[in-house]
Image (tube, rainbow, N blue to C red):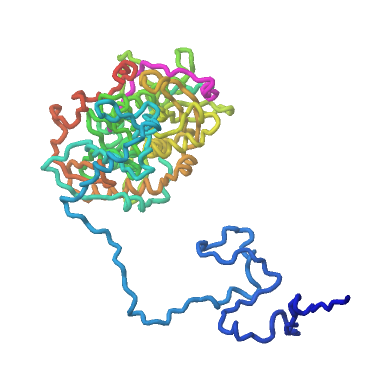
Amino acid sequence: MSETINTAAQFPTFEKPTVQFNEKGWGPCELPDTFKDVPYQPFSKNDRLGKICDWTSTSNNDKKYQNKYASTFGTGNQYAYYHEEDETTFHLVDTARVQKPPHQRGRFRNMRNSRSGRGRNARGGLNTHGHGMTTLSSKNVKARDPRRGMGKRFGNRGPPPKMRESSVAVRADWASIEEMDFPRLIKLSLPNIKDGEDITTCGTLEYYDKTYDRINVKNEKPLQKIDRIVHTVTTTDDPVIRRLSKTIGNVFATDAILATIMCSTRSNYSWDIVIEKVGEKIFMDKRDHTEFDLLTVNETSVEPPTDDDSSCNSPRNLAIEATFINHNFSQQVLKTGDQEAKYKFEETNPFISEDEDIQVASVGYRYKKWELGSDIVLVARCEHDGVLQTPSGEPQFLSIKALNEWDSKLANGVEWRQKLDTQRGAVLANELRNNACKLAKWTVQAVLAGSDQLKLGYVSRINPRDHSRHVILGTQQFKPHEFATQINLSMDNAWGILRCIIDLVMKQKDGKYLIMKDPNKPIIRLYDIPDNTFDSDDSDDGEGDDGEGFQQVYNYANNSNKI
């Protein structure tokens, strides 16, 4: 029995499509009606297909292959947007913040703070006691210490900056002559000032002990208290300057006064200098019983010390400690003793008489003169701290200074004991940031004196809480002119600032003037003050905070118990 099977009903029929043959390229020859209004971007078979579209990225992150997904036919403008409607339908939206009335400001602040503290003591962040008092746990006290600057990450500005006090109270009878802001002073320049010419030299210097160059963190050495007298005599009390003023020069000062003026644009703390004009001569002096000779600590830091005077880390106590360290270090690194050789200048120390039996610090005074143009001749007393014997037998004069570490955590600095031997550049860079003014003044003093080397010592506290015991962790030496270039100190600008102030005073009548740095603004002011100002010993302006004035002769070994 045969059966006929109808295959047409079981399988679908196949209709051959019309295939267009493109002889000139790839793709259809004629565009179908269904795709007539659809934008088309031509592309090549060699193009890499990476992303369909990217609405977020504005630039290619792959810098090495920036044209990795670029098309052969270019980007095209088939998908560009064109605004063809009337622009009158476009409206600006005011996004300004609405100012609340005074009675509504801070209304719910306490409520938000109380809500944010709920349920957090399981994490150890906040602990709530039975009486409802909320305290920080011991684990997070360190992390939430405001002195570490942790709150700044989250927009907390912290307490307002402390207003610094002026170095001297401005009286009502003082007339303000000129205000000089730092941006103008920085632009001043007096180039082509030659090195000073020696007039006379005084004093005796001791030779440097080279064993201190081998000190490191693992081989530290305690800082000794040297019982020696350090003279800090102002300009008009110097017998040599009084003698020279009769025949040489018309502007007289000391290297410390000149360095303060020349580096004034780097200072933050207030200071003042008394200027007397007598005829065509100018005498620059520091006031008696002031803190002018004390070394500042972290003056240019982002967060300078602001503790009260009862703390050992107050600005004044840190300045006394830094001065104590500097003078003791500069004498300890020298070869002392009656049997040791000494370098003697032409004249003896002018500040001690022959019948006085006191031990004076090793210091050499060099009286020099500079010609600043326009018939201005500057005469200044400069200082050397030590001398070094070279292999050729020629002496090299040294300026010896000491940097001190008091508490790296409170100062937001680096640990010297961890970084000094391996990353000394980082330690010095941190000091240049925190003590830019002090280092600049040391450099200017070394350049003015003509020192061959500037020796820097690194002295740290044995215990951060003990400010009376210190150790020497290392030393470093620089050539003054090269170090000035390294710290971006321009001597042309320094001479320009000094010349600007000299010209201002020369235009005034004979009398007494005072130049003072504003304690809270980058401004220097010149005042015309009465002739009898600061002459009375009963004045309270020169006293310290504890009512005791500083003496002109410092004995740091005997006064070490004050530190």
Q: Is 45 rendered above or below residue 147? A: below
Q: Residue at left 38%, top 48%?
A: 493
**Apparent side of residue 508 relative to residue 442 in the rendered image (left or right):** left
Q: Determine if the magenta segment contains residue 263.
A: no
476 or 139, which lies in front? Answer: 139
What span is colored magenta in the figure?
Answer: 211-234
Q: Residue at left 54%, top 64%?
A: 54
Q: Main secondary structure of the magenta part?
A: loop
Residue 369 lies in quadrant: top left
**Apparent side of residue 309 relative to residue 396 in the rendered image (left or right):** left
Q: Residue 212 placed where, x, y %?
A: 51, 22
Figure label count = 0
- Is residue 233 at all visible to an observer of this figure? no
Q: Residue at left 18%, top 24%?
A: 547
239 or 186, which lies in front? Answer: 186
The extreme left residue here reads: 173
Q: Residue 541 placed where, x, y %?
A: 17, 32
Q: Residue 37 placed where, x, y %?
A: 56, 83
- Is residue 285 at all visible to an observer of this figure? yes
